[in-house]
Image (cartoon, helix red, strand yellow):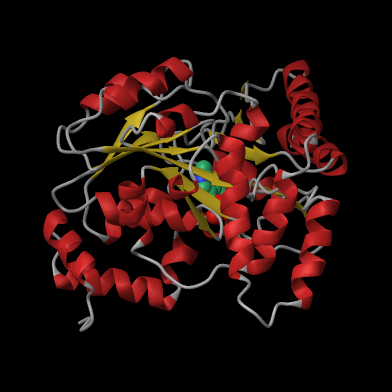
Amino acid sequence: MPADLVPAQRALLAANGLSRRDFARVAAFVAGGTWLSLGSEPALAQLSQIKAIPPNAVRINANENPLGPCSQALDAVQRALVNAGRYQFDLIEAFKETLAAQSGLAVEQVTAYAGSSAPLHQAVLGFCSPSRPFVTADPGYEAGEVAAKAVNAKVIRVPLTAGYAHDVRAMAAAAPDAGLIYLCNPNNPTGTLTPHADILWLADNLPKGCVLLLDEAYIHVSGAPMATELVKAGKDVVILRTFSKIYGMAGLRAGAALGRPDLLAKIAMWSGGPLPSLGMAAATASLQVADLVPTRRKIISDLRDETCQFLQAHGIAFVPSVSNCFMVKTARPGTELVAALRTHNVYIGRVWPSWPNHVRVSVGTAADMAQFRTALLKVLAA
Ligand code: PLP
């Protein structure tokens, strides 16, 4: 039983109908590290994979970016490393200030995190409870569901539309008492967009007291408009950004939540402590490289499109994507294809229960994608 709840935590537990026992369970998850390991892309990827992937394997299973951090980020890491004996809070501030300035936001509207998994989980803790459900898309990124289950919040999955967008009207209507509606744009795993106008509509038509959590982890890859204007307008919206995708910093760790300060406070109270200074330094340096995003967008898109054209030429169905992953339709259970490709040393992503005949494939290097294409044809012919 936690003996040292701060007043704000007590108030939140009361407001969300959570008991001290619920809090103790969540606190134990967080303290034990189980929390982050269960609900993150590597963990979710690993759940559908074997424990150890051979070092020479083609790893296109976790939506990582093989380009890694840009050279300017690596230089910044070197500089920060020399001072790594210190907390280097100034690097956290510099990161927030840079992101805020580039986004046209006040620095109070930005909270820095070590990636976006933490604020995703904590937003669920902050806004969902046994009486405030979590609404998400199906198929969608599952990490929020893990958090919702930990606090006994009901999970409501709303199928994507026939055009693979979030069905914003159905999501808004799914639960009048919803605590959080989670919308990932572009969506993981489908790599498909929800129209900007639909996102604006949803922000204006949320159930009373509900917050829209807009996950823009892959927005840079797509080139679609970001929804920062909703934060500027003071809506009940929190946007998540990560440096794990286009910036290639999944192992370095940097991310941010953008929102109204009162909303950010409800998320931030579930974690504490300084952030990794190397990740902060690398993120700031990456933001200052003007052509990084468009250059990498083109590299990733070209590789994705090349493989999708190959699939089309061979009559293999897939979902057209604007992200760094895409879904391939399989004639047999997707899990069988995943296993068969593994025998060719190619590790692709997982299968979503609602789409048992689809597998997710991440965009790797040109060599990775070539090996995937060769292995796929062999497996399909077998
Ligand atoms: N959101 C989405 C949609 C993701 O796919 C991921 C990881 O793959 C994350 C958030 C969290 O990533 P990270 O914690 O590395 O920022």
Q: Is residue 16 visible?
A: yes
Above-or-below relation of 158 to 165: below
Q: Residue at x 22, y 76 (%)?
A: 5
Q: Is residue 245 left or right of residue 143?
A: right
Above-or-below relation of 302 to 60: above
Quarter of the rendering containing residue 369: top right
Quarter of the rendering containing residue 87: bottom right
Q: How many marks?
A: 0
Q: Nearer the viewer, residue 10 or 179?
A: 10
Q: Residue at x 78, y 16 (%)?
A: 313
Above-or-below relation of 21 to 372: below
Q: Position of residue 334 (x, y in %)?
A: 56, 39
Q: Is residue 56 visible?
A: no
Q: Residue at x 31, y 73 (%)?
A: 27
Q: Nearer the viewer, residue 188 or 332?
A: 188
Q: Is residue 18 left or right of residue 199?
A: left
Q: Position of residue 136 (x, y in %)?
A: 35, 37
Q: Position of residue 16 (x, y in %)?
A: 16, 55
Q: Position of residue 149 (x, y in %)?
A: 28, 56
Q: Quadrant of the N terminus?
A: bottom left
Q: Residue at x 68, y 49 (%)?
A: 64
Q: Quadrant of the C terminus?
A: top right
